[in-house]
Image: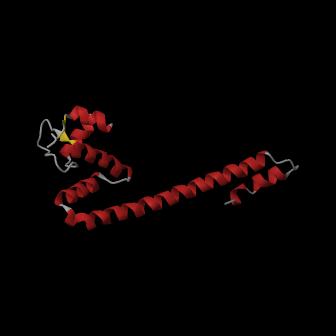
Amino acid sequence: MLEQKIYSLKTVAEKSDYAEKDIRHFVRAELIPSISKDEKNPRFDEFDLQWIRTIRHLQHCHMTEDEIRRYANLYAAGSSTIPERKQMLDEKRQELEAEIYDLQSGLDFISYRQEYYDRIRHCDIDGAAQILLESDMCMF
């Protein structure tokens, strides 16, 4: 049987690109399912390291600390919680898709305005640029 690698807090910080204080916070906040928050010098295995990387992904999904804790607790409770975990991810996915839609709308507006202003700047017809500028607030 292969020996399980055990990592120190410092090593996990280096491998995960989190500061040691952040990982200590994850332990205290019970965001890592297999580590007790009472441990003064926690030791981490490969699962813990992967879980810390999962926390980063969940944060990028705009999950709050409470949501991440709930997700970790559901994970620790076993496979019977898969439907609930999937539902959490479905809800977060819908929120992110709505946010992406809003951001894309903003980008579309900016692109339109930039093209509009480029047309004004490159207008060769006398008076046309002024007409375009006067109608500026009516566009889009």
Q: Residue at x 21, y 39 (%)?
A: 24
Q: Residue at x 80, y 45 (%)?
A: 122
18 on left or right of 136: left
33 on left or right of 126: left
Image quadrant where one finds the C terminus: bottom right
Identify which residue, 17 or 29, lies in the foreground: 17
Image quadrant where one finds the N terminus: top left
Q: Position of residue 11 (x, y in %)?
A: 24, 33
Q: How many marks are shown on the rendered structure? A: 0
Q: Position of residue 53 (x, y in %)?
A: 31, 45
- Asked if 3 appears above or below 57 in the picture, the reply is above
Q: Position of residue 73 (x, y in %)?
A: 20, 57
Q: Note whether residue 18 is visible.
A: no
- Asked if 117 appears above or below 89 in the picture, the reply is above
Q: Note whether residue 63 is visible.
A: yes
Identify which residue, 12 or 117, lies in the foreground: 12
Q: Residue at x 19, y 38 (%)?
A: 5
Identify which residue, 5 or 136, lies in the foreground: 5
User: Which residue in the rendered view is the most extreme toward the right?
Assistant: 126
Specify how the rendered protein is coloured. secondary structure
